[in-house]
Amino acid sequence: MPDREPDRPAGVPEHAEHLTAAAEAGTAVEGWRWMSDSWAAAAEAPEGWHAVRVPADVVDAPMPFVVTDVDSTLIQDEVVELLAAHAGREAEVAEVTERAMRGELDFAQSLHARVEALGGLPVAVIEEVVARVRPTPGARDLIAAVTGAGGRIYAVSGGFTQVLAPLAAAWGLSGFCANELEIADGHLTGRVAGSVVDRAVKEQMLRQWAAEAEMPLLGTLGCGDGANDIDLLTASGCGVALCGKPALREVADACVDVPHLAVVRWMLGL
Ligand SMILES: [Mg+2]
């Protein structure tokens, strides 16, 4: 069914392409996309519209290449909070998460504090939480579009391998990296096994995955929402803050303020 093309907002040129994405979880989004050497015109977005600029190196990249945060970016949830709900400690954990995302707490310290609250939970809760995770609108379309175009899309998360691994397999992610919950005798110990995936590791993974794919860093797109994603966004060719916290917005190349990943797909020309 062809799109019904609405009136162009002032400043949108004749050759601009009209884009729409299906409403998911009550969120619909539409946009216009065009190529221009001039950022100035697009920066003055008309009332009710937001302008996002994609650097030429990303437009001309050999393949679409994305590294994304998970909690509150690829999915709508904060997984540690879903797990905490099973322990009856969600309010306490949510408070620590909020402060960490605002950059008020060192991420590793706050992670250890939150995971400690999960100590004693049976491992069966992990499966229940995986079933409750809600993808961000447009997330699965974005993954399918990137991989369908021969590109790669990876997830790097301050959350947990045990939850992310089944999602990555079901959704077709190119790879992932997250923290590992320590498990003993069928229960969470309340500790993280091994080293913590913090903001520095997020950047390292971007660099490692890009190198493996022989992908120039300037052609990559990094996406996240919190202070923990600052290094990932600044190291990528185009850093996108999705409904980002203030500390991340300051360093982002583009702020997408609607919780729908169709906008990121459009930014990649997909
Ligand atoms: Mg996040």
Image: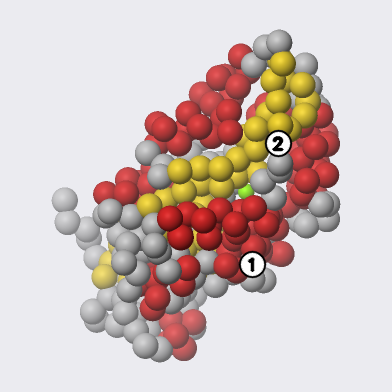
Position of residue 248 measured from the top left corner of the image (x, y, whole percent): 66, 64
Residue at mark 1:
249
Task: Report, in whole angstroms, how far the alpha carbon at label 2 lies from the one at label 1.
Answer: 30 Å
In this orientation, which residue lies closer to the viewer: 191 or 110? 191
The answer to whether residue 259 is seen in the rendering is no
Circle 2: residue type = Gly
Position of residue 177 measured from the top left corner of the image (x, y, whole percent): 56, 43
Residue at the (65%, 38%) spot, across then down: 179
- Please identify the residue farthest to the top as the structure is shown: 185
Position of residue 139 measured from the top left corner of the image (x, y, whole percent): 43, 46
Q: Secondary structure at mark 1?
A: helix
Disc 2 residue crowd, few under 14, some 14–19, many 20+, Cα 10 Å: few
Residue 1 horizontal side relative to residue 106, left or right? left
Q: Which mark is residue 194?
A: 2
Q: Give the quadrant of residue 189.
A: top right
- Ligand 1 within 8 A of label 1's CB? no
Residue 225 horizontal side relative to residue 143, left or right? right
Residue at the (64%, 16%) spot, across then down: 123
- Does 116 sit above or below residue 74? above
Give the quadrant of the C terminus: bottom left
Label located before the other in sequence (2 or 1) = 2
Circle 1: residue type = Arg
Mark toward the viewer: 2 or 1: 2
In this orientation, which residue lies closer to the viewer: 86 or 67? 67
Q: Secondary structure at mark 2?
A: loop
Position of residue 114 measured from the top left corner of the image (x, y, whole percent): 78, 35
